[in-house]
Every structure is written in structure tokens, then in C-alpha cells.
Image (spheres, rainbow, N blue to C red):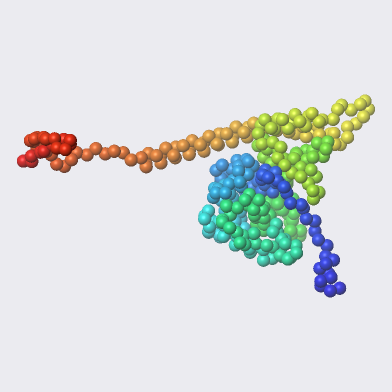
Amino acid sequence: MSASAALMTEKKGHVCPPSNAKHPSDRWETTFIYSFICKFTRLRAKVEGLETPMDLENALLSRDSDPIITQILQQFVLNLRPQTRNLSADQITPTVASLLAEYFKTSERTVFWNDDLKLNLDPFDGLQGNFFAQDWDFKLKVLRQLVELQLEHNAEIKNTIDLAWGVQHNKHKKREAQDVPPDPSDPKSKQKLQLNPIGQDTQRKRYWVVDDSPRIYISTNPWKMAATFQTISSTREEYVATIESIKATAPTEPKANEKRSKAELNHLALVKALEDRIEAVDNEINRVAKVRRKIEQRALLQAQAEVRTTRTRRQIRKPDYVYNDFVNSEVCLGVRTTQYCLD
């Protein structure tokens, strides 16, 4: 068989249809990136203003040099190229472009893989403006690619995953105490690192939560190419309304000697799981509110300090000359002039 014939008969992989989402909150990639940040980095504790998924979404929407996106990019680059120095906001665009170009040289398929050309296309090629000036879809794709590269190429992250899943590369080596998978309550355990739906309803729609914020996502079967994904709750009011909506569609009580179906049991378990989180959601809302107030107070104090240092004051100085005696005054052309005589 000729090379051209082999190419024609080559089986192509499944290609998911493009998303029609109008906001980053309705894209699964945003959840993927935020979940990675929470589980594998300390960025939430280090980056001021990054407290909830909504903060990441607002940063993606900004066309300015956003400090949240800047610090996320800086950390992602350092995780892949630790010795990188050009990380300032005005230099981060060529730095990220150079980093991705290195990985695009291989045959590894990325988000930017072109199936016809059999290579990865450089998303920064012919780019007008810097990274921050692009639309949120472009930023989302680049950040997603950086996350996937870290999961595959960052040694520390790979070791964390291997340990959590009990992967032992050298099977002949005696397992040490530090090689034992972490306890399920450990943030680095398999149970904590996985992102599984909190439950599903009778229509088999999956419900997802990433942190203790009131944010809830809903999706259809994620294993299908045509799966949909969207946000249904971002505030406490929406969170409670979602629970009530699920309750309203709950299955009725079974008849005598009848057992509930698995779908019905899952629906009821979903309601309980969401209700059990209300206290944690309230605590998280209060925590975020306190952080916001501190940020606002600090910004106010800084603004007041700048006003004090830049405010000009009128200085009153005595003249270094003195008129000794008044001699005469006259009116000339309607203007009163005063004549003085110096000693």
C-alpha cells in the first residue's frame, strides 16, 4: 500500500464539536484550570484576589494586564522551566510563546494540533497585541495547554499523582514508608485529587463542585462527544434555589414492596450531598468577604497615602524686602497707584 493510500485509510480520532459558550463560566476548561490551581499549586494562597472560580473568569475577561492571570502564567512557566527569568507582565507573552514552541517541536498532540498538517500550530504566530489583549477563548486554550503540560512533564506533580495512585515504577524496589499512598483525608490523596461529580439526578445530569464556593456546574455524560457543560449557581441564593429545583423533580415515594431504582437513589443522594455542604458554603462566603474587605481597606489606605504625598500646600513666605515709608498716592487713568520712597 502506498503512503498516500495509507494516509487516506488512517483512522482519525474523535473531534469534539466547538463550544458555543458565551462566557468562560460555561466552559469545562475553566473548571479544569481552576481545579488544577486548587489541587496542585499554592496560587490561591499567594495571589491576591484569586478566591473563587468567578475571580478566574473575571480575570480571563479582562483585556488589560491582569495581575491574577500574570501570576498564574508566571507559576505555570516556572513549573515547566524553573530557570526562566523574563516573567514580568510586559515580557510574559514572548516567554509563554517560546515555552510552547519547545513542546510543539515534538509529535505530541496538543490543544493546537492540526490533523491535516500533522503538527501543532503556534497560537502566537501572527498574534496582534500581547497575551492579555486577546479574547478569553484564546487565554483559556493556552492556560489549558499549560496545565496539561505540567501534568505530564513537571516531576513534582507527576510524583504526587503516582504516589496517590500507588504507582511504583521500580517494582523490584522495596516499598518505603514514604511510598505508601496518602490517607484519604490528605489533600494529596487520590480521593482529593480526583474531580468527580458530586452526584447526578434522575435525568443522569452530573453536578460538579470544585471548592466550597456556591458555584455549581451541570453537565450531561462527560464521556460523550456532544456533552454539554454550564454553570447553574454562583451565589448562595442560586445554590439554595438549585437544591429546591432538584427536590421538586425528586421521585415520589415507592409503592409497597417496591424498591427505588438506582437513578432515583442517586437523585436523593444528590439532594443530601448539596444540603450537607450549605454550612461549608456559608463559611467560605464569609471568609471570602473578609478577604475582600481587607483588600479594599488596604487599597483605600494606599490611595490616601498617595494623596498625602502628592498634595501641594501653599507656602507663606515673608518678602526679603521692606517698604519704609508711604509718600504719595495718585490716580492715573482710573488706576490707583502707590508711590513709595526708599530710605
State the residue at coordinates (44%, 39%): 303
Q: In the picture shown, does residue 269 fall above or below 18?
A: above
Left or right relative to 8: residue 241: left
Quadrant in the picture for the N terminus: bottom right
State the residue at coordinates (80%, 45%): 221
Left or right relative to 221: residue 160: left
Quick one: 176 or 339, which is closer to the camera?
Answer: 339
State the residue at coordinates (51%, 36%): 296
Residue pushed farthest front? Answer: 333
Left or right relative to 71: residue 240: right
Q: In the picture shown, does residue 174 fall above or below 259?
A: below
State the residue at coordinates (84%, 70%): 5
Residue pushed farthest left? Answer: 343
Q: Position of residue 150 (x, y in %)?
A: 66, 55
Q: Position of residue 166 (x, y in %)?
A: 74, 51
Residue 53 appears in view = yes
Q: In the picture shown, does residue 96 fall above or below 207?
A: below
Residue 78 appears in view = no
Residue pushed farthest right? Answer: 257
Quadrant in the picture for the C terminus: top left
